[in-house]
Image: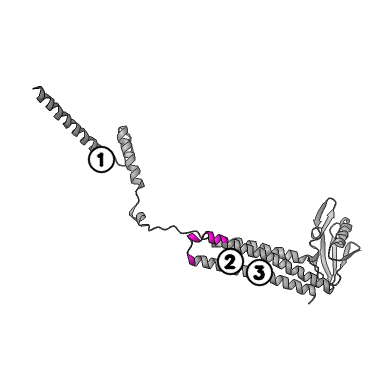
Amino acid sequence: MALLLRRGAAVAARTLRAAAASSASTSVHRLPTAGSLAAARNLPTTQFFLLEIRRGFAKGKKSKNDSRGDTVEAAPDIGPTVKSAATAQMDTAVVALSRELSKLRTGRASPGMLDHIMVETGDVKVGLSRIAVVSVLDSHTLSVMPYDPNTMKSIENAIASSPLGINPTPDGSRIIAAVPPLTKETMQAMCKVVTKSAEDFKQSIRRARQKALDTIKKSSSSMPKDDIKRLEKEVEELTKKFIKSADDMCKAKEKEISGS
C-alpha cells in the first residue's frame, strides 16, 4: 500500500512540473507586443525582463536589404579642399616674391622702390609709405610728400641710409629723390639677386605642391583611381601656373634693371 502511495505521489509531481513548464512557455510566447507598453508594465518582473530582451533582439536584427549591402557610403570629395589650400600657399609665395623684387633698385624711378624703407619716428619704426606719399616726377626722380612736416628729417635720413644709393634733397614741404643710373656691374649683381629670389620662392611653390600630393596619397585608399589621377593632374597644372607667374615677374624685373 505504501509503495502504491509513493508511486502515485511521484506521478502527481511529474504532472505538476509538466503543467508548470507548459504554462511558463505559453506565458512567454503570449507576451504583449512592443507597442503595448502599458500592458507590459503590468507584467511580473521576470516576464517584463523577457519582453525587453525580445524587443532588443528585434531592434538589433538587420533587414534583408542591409545584409545585401545595397547602401554604400560615398567617400568625401577632398579635391576642392586640397586645391584651395595649395592655391592659397602658392599665391602667398608669389605675392612675397613680388614684394621682395620691389625692394630692388632699378635704373628707372618707381613709387614702390621706397616701400620697404623704415622710418624712425620717436620710439617707433614705420614704413615710409604709411607717413608719406611717393610719386614719380620723371623716369629718374621721385617726390616724397610727408603727411606730417615734422617727419621730413627722419624720412630724409631713412632714404639716405637705405642701400638704394639715393641722395634725397629737401624741397620746401617735400623731398626730391634722384635715382642714379645703374652701372653695368650693379645691373649684373641685381639680376643675380632676382634669379636667387625667384628660385627661393619657387621652392615654396613646390613645397605647397608636395603637401597637396601627400594629402591625396593619404586619402587614396578611399578614392577611385581615376579621381586620384585627375586631382594630381590639377595640382600639377596649378604648380606650373604659379611657377610661370614667378618666372614672368623675374624676367620683367631683369628687363627693368637693365633698362631694356
The residue depicted at 76 percent of the width and 70 percent of the height is: 192
Q: Which residue is mark 3?
A: 243
Residue 169, position in %: x, y? 90, 64
Residue 144, position in %: x, y? 85, 63
Q: Amino acid at mark 2?
A: Val
Q: Which residue is mark 1?
A: 29
Q: Amino acid at mark 1?
A: His
Q: Earlier in the sequence, mark 2 or mark 3?
A: 2
Please state the extent of the stretch shown in magenta in the rendering.
214-225
Residue 84, position in %: x, y? 59, 62
**Does the magenta-highlighted stretch encompass residue 17?**
no
The residue depicted at 32 percent of the width and 42 percent of the height is: 54
Residue farthest to the front, as pictured? 3
Q: Which residue is mark 2?
A: 235
* CB under 8 Å between discs 3 and 1: no
| Distance (Cα) linking label 1 and label 2 | 65 Å
State whether residue 73 is above or below residue 30: below
185 to the left or right of 50? right
The residue depicted at 84 percent of the width and 53 percent of the height is: 121
Q: Looking at the rendering, in which quadrant would you find the C terminus? A: bottom right
Q: Earlier in the sequence, mark 3 or mark 1?
A: 1
Q: Earlier in the sequence, mark 1 or mark 2?
A: 1
| Distance (Cα) linking label 3 and label 1 | 77 Å
Q: Amino acid at mark 3?
A: Ile
**Does the magenta-highlighted stretch encompass residue 224?**
yes
